Image (tube, rainbow, N blue to C red):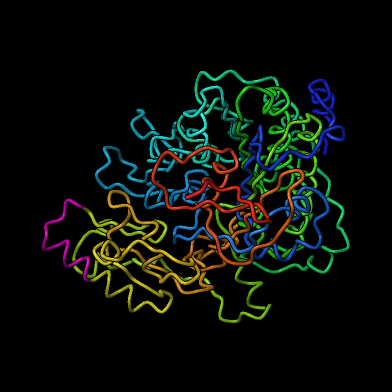
Amino acid sequence: MRLFRTLAAAASLLVTTPLAAQQAPSPETPPRLIVVISVDQFSANLFAEYRPQFRFGLARMASGAVFPSGYQSHSATETCPGHSTILTGARPARTGIIANDWIDLNADREDKTIYCAEDESVPGSNSDDYTVSPKHLRVSTLGEWMKAANPDSRVVAVAGKDRAAVMMSGHNPDQIWWWGKDGFVSYAGRQAPATITRINTSVAERIATAEPALPLPDFCRPRAVAIPVGNGTIGDGRFARAAGDKGAFKASPEFDEAVTAAAAGLATELKLGQGDAPDLLIVGASATDYVGHAYGTQGSEMCLQLLSLDEQLGQLFAVLDSTGVDYAVVLTADHGGTDATERQQIQGMPDAHRITRDPVAGVAASVGLPEGSIRGDSGNYWIDPSLSQADHDRLAAAAIAHFKADPDIAEVFTRDEILAAPAPSGPPEDWSMIERARASYDTERSGEIIIALKPRVSPIAAPRPGRASTHGSFWDYDRRVPILFWRKGMTSFEQPLSVETVDIAPTLAGLLHMPVPVEIDGRCLDLDAGTASTCPAN
């Protein structure tokens, strides 16, 4: 916890009333600070597996109001769509964030792929080198509702990924910082608070120094089994890192320590929760996702990552406690995830396998059209709008027939079929496949054809370093995430029935005694374990 140690002296200067001297806040009194934490790729399965091992921050969260079966209920279980649901109360069909990337074949640039958090109107922008922007988010966020209700409220976001920070903070945050190439960065013209400057200096020094392997706790030892994947192995790593290796830094517990330390420093430096209006602190912890992609979910790497994150969140809460501020926390995830295929095959799932080819390869050529006439991303497929109607129809029919004959594909839906389906309702685990697709579908951005791979079919045909496993399916291992609320003095309870991440924003609005000013998809969850309610009366 070296980065937290560098913050300790600065944090102590900003302490107001020691926590031990405070009374537990009344549930009738709105908290002064809302803290929202998204742990990227923290599935409900991982929470259940590691819950007995948590001792610090995640243990605190598990002592509050626990909804172990939360849902990112839509089919587009990726980082950008998932984060767009957490503080908007809206599913991707409403937020407009249908994937991390989508294809716009009418785009006036060579690169037709649009990144969810880019401003493609900036000259020279492309989906790999872009100017970060919230322009694609079509709805407002909790932070925007707070600022509309009281302009003195402040919204502060720090995350490992730009899309996490942008999609949760919305269109006008007071402070927004995400990890760039060499440190935390923000929109052009933003002056860095002292915390960000200090953290960037500390992280640069840390990356420049080799990192030895982490000690392996007893609980992690049985998980440390080398599994051949591609040209290497995964499963028994301990995050030893060569000096200067930025990629290894991001795919390790070190990365989340930088994010949580920055969040702690910003909370104290900016005196969040100590003004005349409630404030919002947003934390996007991204390392679990990088670890999951690189090493899968069941090896020593994920074990070390989650136990480290538990400790890091404990450190963050200790800093917040020291300020004496009455704060409420929610922790969830943008999506779940599944393990590497090779380990699944030897752990009771012999049917798990990787696709062997691009599902659409050769389809255009089969009807005499150029290969680029149909393009896909994240299960969406777009047909070249410059084709004649006859060529378009021939290609669409060939693609649909090809997809339906593919043994790895579970479902194929057309635009018209999806739009004819009603908006989903009821428990998300009971939604049909087309209802899951409908919750993600945007008429301007989504593909003309949508496919869903069968369960346990990995879309990664050829694994490589940093790319052993993934997410993004229609299935519950990618949809289910924990939703945990905590506030000092609250009575703990557990509700095992399903809820959705779109319920988080209205629930927090209820805690703040603030109406939801726009139409949303979610509902307020009552966090009072007794007969009272934290939700507004109907």
Instruction: Specify whether 508 is left or right of 447.
Output: right
Q: Reply yes or no: does residue 200 show up in magenta.
A: no
Residue 343 visible in image: yes
Quarter-wise, where is residue 130 in the image?
top left
Q: On the picture, is 303 further left or further right than 482?
A: right
Residue 197 visible? The answer is no
Where is residue 498 shown, x and y percent of the image?
Answer: 56, 65
The number of numbered discs placed on residues in the rendered structure image is 0
Residue at 30%, 66% in the rendered image = 421
Indicate the position of residue 497 as horizontal and vertical percent values: 59, 67
Left or right: where 72 falls relative to 247: left
Q: Position of residue 230 (x, y in %)?
A: 61, 65
Q: Quadrant of residue 395?
A: bottom left
Q: Position of residue 36 (x, y in %)?
A: 62, 42
Front residue of 376 and 435: 435
Residue 51 vs residue 143, the one in the foreground? 143
Residue range of the region highlighted in magenta in the rendering: 385-397
Q: Assess whether residue 390 is covered by the magenta stretch.
A: yes
Q: What secondary structure predominates along the stretch shown in magenta?
A: helix
